[in-house]
Amino acid sequence: MSLNLPKIGNKAPAFTALNQHGEKVKLSDFKGKKVVLYFYPKAMTPGCTTQACGITSAKDAFAAKNAVVFGMSPDAPERLVKFIDKQNLNFDLLSDEDHSIADKYGVWALKKFMGREYDGIHRLTFIIDEEGKLEHIMEKVKTKTHHDDVLALL
């Protein structure tokens, strides 16, 4: 099974999504900064919590590299607020309830787990440069070292 990912060097797919406060976040608002957009399956699950807490711990390192980080999942904004509050996260999580943004980035696809097949989000990270072009795609994400792995690429 292969994902239909956008091409590195091309303009990153534009998006507008709601953050945990129900505020619109547009990719185009971050021109001049690097954007780390990571897709994760579900808030408050063990792997997603490990990944998000790593990002939180590295906030200053991301800022030093002129980078802003967004986590995106199919969770509703209300669930994202609970996740942020419970884990004391210090960055925005974005809601993609209809998975239209995940579709644009090619990360919504067939998954297999414990003999079951279903459509869902694949855990991938996209690094977008200051001009809005796709600079790097991390297809193999380790939740424990994700923040360090991304920082090494910035």
Image (cartoon, helix red, strand yellow):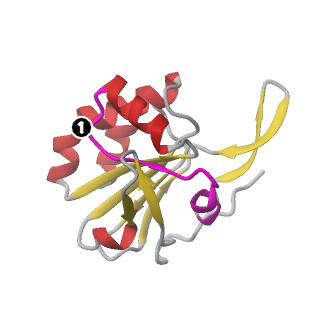
Residue 20 percent across, percent down from the top left:
39, 45
Q: Considering only vertical position in the picture, is 140 above or below 51?
A: below
Residue 78 percent across, percent down from the top left:
46, 38
Crowdedness near tag 1: few (<14), some (14–19) or many (≥20) residues, C-alpha within 10 Å: some
**Identity, as a three-letter code, of the amino acid under mark 1:** Ala
Can residue 145 be seen at all in this image of the molecule?
no
Q: Magenta includes 70?
A: no
Q: Which residue is mark 1?
A: 58
Q: Magenta includes 100?
A: yes
Residue at 37% x, 74% y: name it: 132
Lateral position of residue 70 relative to residue 106, left or right: left
Residue 97 vs residue 112, the one in the foreground = 97
**Among the 4 quarters of the image, the one containing residue 113:** top right
Lateral position of residue 15 relative to residue 131, left or right: right
Residue at 19% x, 59% y: name it: 66
Lateral position of residue 88 relative to residue 96, left or right: left
Residue at 63% x, 55% y: name it: 99
Q: Considering only vertical position in the picture, is 118 above or below 100?
A: above
Image quarter in which the C terminus is found: bottom left
Q: Which residues are magenta?
A: 88-104
